[in-house]
Amino acid sequence: MQNLQKLVEEAWEERHLLEFKEYFEAIQTVIMKLDNGELRVAEPVGDRWHVNDWIKKAVILYFPIREMQEIDNKPFVYHDKMKLKTNYKELGVRVVPGASARYGAYLAKGVIMMPSYVNIGAYVGEGTMVDTWATVGSCAQIGKHVHLSGGAGIGGVLEPVQAAPVIIEDNVFVGSRVIVVEGVHVESEAVLGANVVLTASTKIIDVSGAEPIEYKGRVPARSVVIPGTYTKKFPAGEYQVPCALIIGKRKDSTDKKTSLNDALRDHNVAV
């Protein structure tokens, strides 16, 4: 791994090195290891997440060494630089027609992909459901037994290379049309209600106690989150600005596979 990292870093600084076999093959090896889960763009180390910047560099460098080609995947035809994953039966992954994942994305055993999309560098953990029209962006990290509901958009990131990817930890429920981008970290067993939008600058306000507690870029474990607004002053007057509201915690007694409606009903909220 140290040798692979060394070659990638050198090619990143001197792009002409990609013309040499040793560097060309190093980039291909990194993407292969991403595809089979041996490498990850980000990974838990103790109680924190570590981002492997050099692996993101390899993903970026993979594009210039690939040539455009027509991909005939009957009845669909594509024209792209990237291959699609094809070994789903061997992986134990269910893929409904209309779904696609790029080579270089890892899908663990038991993943279900409805007509949806997973981009290169992403990691999708065991037993996760990627529902209809949900998208998992490049390098996003999705944990085990996550439910990405219809139309959910999990943002990708390649550049700048030091930027953290979106991280969705184990057993998170992501409601319909939820958007999570810009490196937001959703901790385990959280529930995101329909239409919640989380960016790096979104205020995430815990309103379940006597005083509000504000977060940015992170949803604490087991939080139940719904869309909200707060009043912000502008030169032209006061206006409502979107935010996210933590209205409570997922109960210990609540089944991890519970529906979103059940989790919200616990807190007397309908969304």
Image: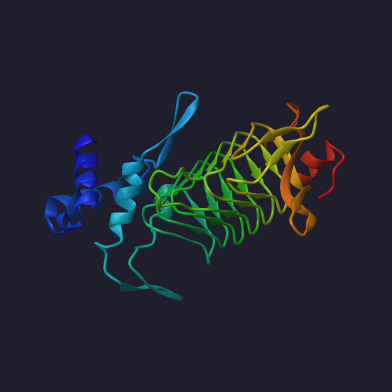
Residue 163, compared with residue 206, is above or below; it is below
Is 150 situated left or right of 161 in this image?
Answer: right
Give the quarter of the image for residue 190: top right
Looking at the image, which residue is at 51% across and 41% down? 126
> In this orientation, does residue 193 appear?
no
Residue 115, compared with residue 122, is above or below; it is below
- Image quadrant for the N terminus? top left
The scheme the figure's colours follow is: rainbow
Disc tally is 0
Q: Which sits in the foreground, 53 or 194?
A: 53
Looking at the image, which residue is at 30% across and 50% down? 58
Residue 222, compared with residue 113, is above or below; it is above
Is 157 situated left or right of 193 in this image?
Answer: left
Residue 22, compared with residue 50, is above or below; it is below
The image shows residue 227 at horizontal and vertical percentages of 75, 48
Q: Which sits in the foreground, 77 or 214?
A: 214
The image shows residue 3 at horizontal and vertical percentages of 19, 38
Is 199 situated left or right of 237 in this image?
Answer: left
Is 187 situated left or right of 16 in this image?
Answer: right
Tell which residue pokes out farthest to the front in this image: 235
> In this orientation, does residue 223 appear?
yes
Tell which residue pokes out farthest to the top in this image: 46
Q: Which sits in the foreground, 178 or 9?
A: 9
Looking at the image, which residue is at 19% across and 46% down? 10
The image shows residue 115 at horizontal and vertical percentages of 56, 63
Looking at the image, which residue is at 25% across and 52% down? 28
The image shows residue 26 at horizontal and vertical percentages of 21, 48
